[in-house]
Amino acid sequence: MLLQQGNLDAGRPVKRIHAVNELRPVLGPWALLCLGVGAIIGAGIFIIPGPAAAQFAGPAIVFSFVIAAVGCGLSGLCYAELASMYPLAGSAYSYTSRAFGRLAGWVVGWLLILEYLFAAAIVTQGFASYAIGLLPIANSESHHVLISMLLSLTVVLVVTYLAVRGVEFSARVNSVIVVTKVTVILAVIFFGIRYVNPQHWSPFLPPNSGRWGEYGWSGVVRAAGIVFYAYLGFDIVSVSAQEARRPQRDVPLALLGSLVVCTLLFVPMMLVVTGLVDYHRLNVANPVAVALESAGGDLSWLVPVVRSGAMISMVSVLLVILMGQARIVYAMARDGLLPDALARLHTQWKTPAIATFAGASIATGLTVTIPISLLGQLVSVGVLSAFVAVALGVLVLRRRLPSAPRPFRTPLVPWVPLGAILVCGYMAIGLPALTWLRLGIWLLLGAIIYIAYGRHHYSAQAPLDAVEHLRTDAR
């Protein structure tokens, strides 16, 4: 079945519409939930919160996660509505381009590309950091750098193959890994809580240093904007909507379910980690292992388990991120904003292989050139911007297309979308000024590509009101 042809930009040429089932609809509710959890539980709990606690929030990092969860919950309700209306690859890019036109779509899509590429680099760095702790190597910085590069390259190659191998196969691998890493997190909480030293929580909210964003409540807000990166899994569930068997039902359930599961794990996990060690010592790429090692011999047996679990976790996250990044690029290339080659699917496995390889190559380069703290801030600003765009999309489309079928409806409109905009916008504003400067440079690069290529080739595959609501029954 083909989508009806159409275009929001009057007078522009329209390409032949791709068949909706070019990407195979093979994912059920469990696989979608595991994709979300698989992307959220990884660097978002094993890496990023440590430096955020050490530099900005202290033990009050748990409040940062709560703020981030509120913003994600409100945004997730908005995502759920648009994903149920428009079950195609592209996520926030597709929603924004249909709601606001090609230029807004390009900006959001370009931000999503930043988000996924830099997230992949974070995860790759985290994998190498935890892996080095398990290897009997000399305590030499030069050795560590070389081995990190080799480990990073190896894991990217393996995961890229899995991502190209097919979404159904990748989803099975991811589901097994998700069960493994949830078990590791529960073990840290259960065994680590016995060795918590309450003195490490005093003061629970360190006083502000005199500069905005360094401890105090401003530090909590800044940390919330950084750990918001963890909830990238929201977007990945939405990105995979075209490959879901029942997207109108299962995508909203997976979006909201992944938020609940991960928040219930994140808060007690960070309470334990900050209770085991002085938060100043968590400014490392392997904070959970550092916290457990500080407890002494009683928890020494758990350290290699956590390192192994974190490594496995990173494989899962990297797999899901590369899958999501490739589908964003695929959707943009499908609409003509990027070269057609990036929209080509593997003849056997029906996955965007060229887009996957391109993203993996760039992410590998970022891994060895940009520090992890900077990567996390850039990812967060991309995620927050995309979430604001989705919430705006709900408001605009409720007005422009009030009678369009909505299998899932965001409750309390306009208050829920407005709440998402306010909370996510507030967290974004709290990020360091240099992050916004770097974002401006990224957007400038995107503007050059858009002017030189995208605006001359764009033709939306279908406006939102022309989309038929497909696959309401399992195929």
Image (cartoon, helix red, strand yellow):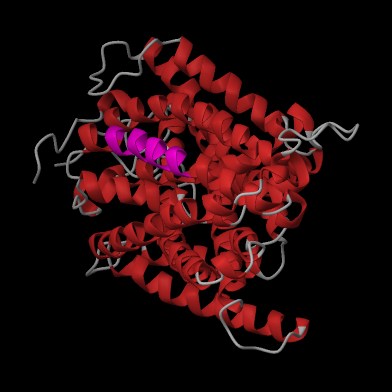
Magenta stretch: helix, strand or loop mostly: helix
Q: Please indicate whether residue 397 sits to the left or right of residue 18 in the image.
A: right
Bounds of the magenta span? Answer: 252-265
Query: Observer-nearest residue: 119 or 42?
Result: 42
| Residue drawn at x 76%, y 85% as measured from the top left | 140
The residue shown at (51%, 63%) is: 359
Front-most of residues 377 and 288: 288
Does residue 317 belong to the magenta stretch?
Answer: no
Q: Against 275, is 469 above or below? A: above
Q: Is residue 433 visible?
A: yes
Q: x%, y% of residue 246?
A: 18, 39
Q: Quadrant of residue 451?
A: top right
Judge whether 11 appears above or below 451 on screen.
above
Classify the position of the N terminus by image quarter: top left
Q: Kindly identify the residue that appears in the image at 28 percent across and 34 percent down.
A: 253
In this orientation, does residue 13 appear? no
Residue 475 location in percent, x, y?
A: 8, 46
Q: Is residue 217 left or right of residue 167?
A: right
